[in-house]
Amino acid sequence: MSRPLRPGAVGPQGRHERLEATPAEREALAARLGLLGLDALTAEIDLAPAPGGALRARGTLRAAVVQECVVTLDPVPGAVEAPIDWRILPPGEESSDELDDGPDEIESEPDGSADLGEALVQDLALALDPYPRAPGAELPSGASDGKASPFAALRALGGVPKPG
């Protein structure tokens, strides 16, 4: 899903963008993200100039998804609503790679354009439930004894010493 923001498209007064994935894009994105379905993907974004030649983008991502239950493999429909907070960097400026609570930094192309669609898809991927469960789905009894560790199989082979 590509939605390039051209350089100069955001004037001093700012700009509002509405992004919406087409049915073909939703189908391709569902396959890319391992979803059973992606029934809707939209975003409302307000763009404004920021210090240092950057742009600030704030808004909301909304999606209707169908994921696979991690227990039963049944379809699990769900709604995703997540805030968008991006700082679109000017050409030549690289992301700081610092882990903080600030906006996500989006690097722009050498011509100054930035792909808002790809940034939206990445935010959606991060907002998905990593372990979706169908209502009432439970692991079978005995599936976990509570004592197993990730190294239990290696210990059985003699590859990892017992903690002592």
Image (spheres, rainbow, N blue to C red):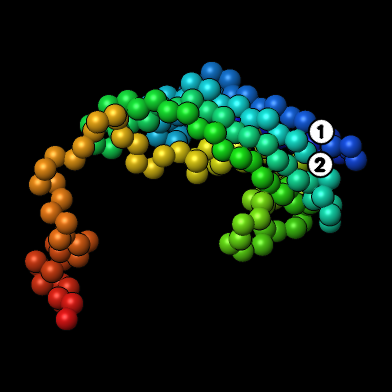
* Quarter in which the N terminus is drawn: top right
Identified by mark 1, the residue type is Arg
Judged left or right of residue 21, residue 142 is: left
Q: Position of residue 115 (x, y in %)?
A: 68, 39
Depicted 150 relative to depicted 13: above or below: below
Name the quadrant containing residue 73.
top left
Judged left or right of residue 69, residue 22 is: right
Considering the numbered disc 2 on the image, is that residue within a helix, a strand or a loop?
strand
Residue at 11% x, 43% y is 141
Looking at the image, is mark 1 or mark 2 earlier in the sequence?
1
Residue at 72% x, 49% y is 87
Q: Position of residue 161 (x, y in %)?
A: 15, 77
Considering the numbered disc 1 on the image, is that residue within a helix, a strand or a loop?
strand
Identified by mark 2, the residue type is Ala
Depicted 155 relative to depicted 88: above or below: below
| Mark 1 and mark 2 residues within 8 Å of each other at the beta carbon | yes
Residue at 58% x, 62% y is 99
Judged left or right of residue 147, residue 105 is: right
Q: Label 1, on which residue?
A: 15
Determine which of the numbered discs, if any, sits on residue 48 in the image.
Answer: 2
